Image: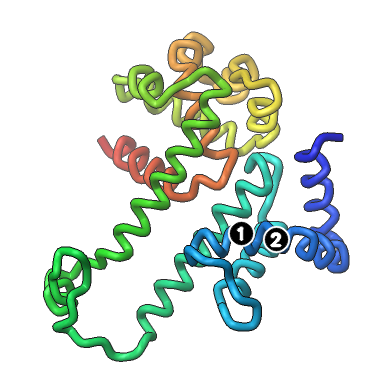
Amino acid sequence: MNDEHRIVSQVYAAKEDIRAADDFIRAYLPFIKTETAKFLKRPPVEGQDDELSIAMMAFHEAIHGYSRTRGAFLKYASMLIRSRLIDFSRQERRHSGAVSLDMPADEEQKSLGEKLADGRDYHEELVMRDATRQEIAELTRQMEHFEVSLSDVADNCPRQQRTLAACRKALEYAKEHPELLDDLLKTQRLPIGRLSEGSGVERKTLERHRKYMIALLLIYTNGYEIIRGHLKQVMKGAAKT
C-alpha cells in the first residue's frame, strides 16, 4: 500500500472513530504546524497563537469533509487550513482595536482613511489573489499529468453556446457520479464512453473537447474552491445568454 492509500485509509477510519481521529491529528501535527507557519510567516507558538488551534480544527474538518474525489488528502487539508486561517484573519481585523485613519496603510503611503473612502478591502484582495494563484498553480501541475496545459484548455473551450451547454451537462453528470472522477484520477484518461452514455452528450462532442472536459472534471476532484466558484458564475452567465 503506497503512502496516499495509507493516508486515505486512515482518514476513513478517523471518520468513524474519535480515537482514530485524535491519533491521526496527533500524527500529523507537524504538518498542521507547517501549514500554520506558512500563513504566519513564522513558526506558531502552542498556547499563544490562536491560528494553530484554527488550523487543527480545519484539519479535523478536512477529515470529515474528505472524499476520494477530492484528490490527495493532504493537499485538500492544506487548502482548507489556509481558507480557515484567512477567514480567522478577516474576523480578527474586523474586531481589532482602533487604528489611526491617518496612518499609512501600505507601501503606496495612502492612509487607512483614504483606503476606506473608496470602499475596497485591499488586504483581502491581495489575500484572495494569492490564494487564487496557488489554486491555479496546483491545477496546472495536476493537468500536466494529463498532458494538458492552460493554453490547451483555452484553445479547446467550446465556442458555440449549444456545445458549451452539452459540456456543462456532461460535467453535471460526472459530479453526480463521483466514481467517474475517481476513474479519471486513476487512469489519467477521460471516461468518454461512460460520460457520453450517462449524460446523453454525443461522444464526438466530448472527444472534440477532451482537454477542456479534463480540466473541468479535475476542478471537481480537489479543493479548488475559488476556481469552482468562478466556474459556477461563468456557467450561470452562459446559461442566461
Q: Do the residues labelled 1 and 2 touch (CB within 8 Å)?
A: yes
Q: Which disc is residue 215 wearing?
A: none
**Quarter the C terminus occupies:** top left
Q: Mark 1 points at which residue?
A: 34
Q: Outermost residue toward the front?
A: 42
Determine the image quadrant of residue 57: bottom right
- Vertical order, 29 against 174 (above or below): below
**Quarter the N terminus occupies:** top right
Determine the image quadrant of residue 2: top right
* Real-space Cα separation, disc 1 to disc 2, in angstroms: 6 Å
Secondary element type, mark 2: helix
Q: Name the residue under label 2.
A: 30
| Image colouring | rainbow
The answer to which of 191 and 128 lies nearer the viewer is 128
The answer to which of 220 and 201 lies nearer the viewer is 220
Secondary element type, mark 1: helix
- Vertical order, 98 against 90 (above or below): below
Instruction: Give the residue type at disc 1.
Output: Thr
Q: Image point 58% across, 42% down: which residue? A: 222
Q: Image point 66% across, 36% down: which residue? A: 178
Is residue 63 shown left or right of residue 55?
A: right
Q: Image point 76% across, 40% down: which residue? A: 4
Determine the image quadrant of residue 6: top right
Residue 85 percent across, percent down from the top left:
51, 67
What is the total number of numbered labels drawn onto the structure image?
2
Instruction: Give the residue type at disc 2.
Output: Pro
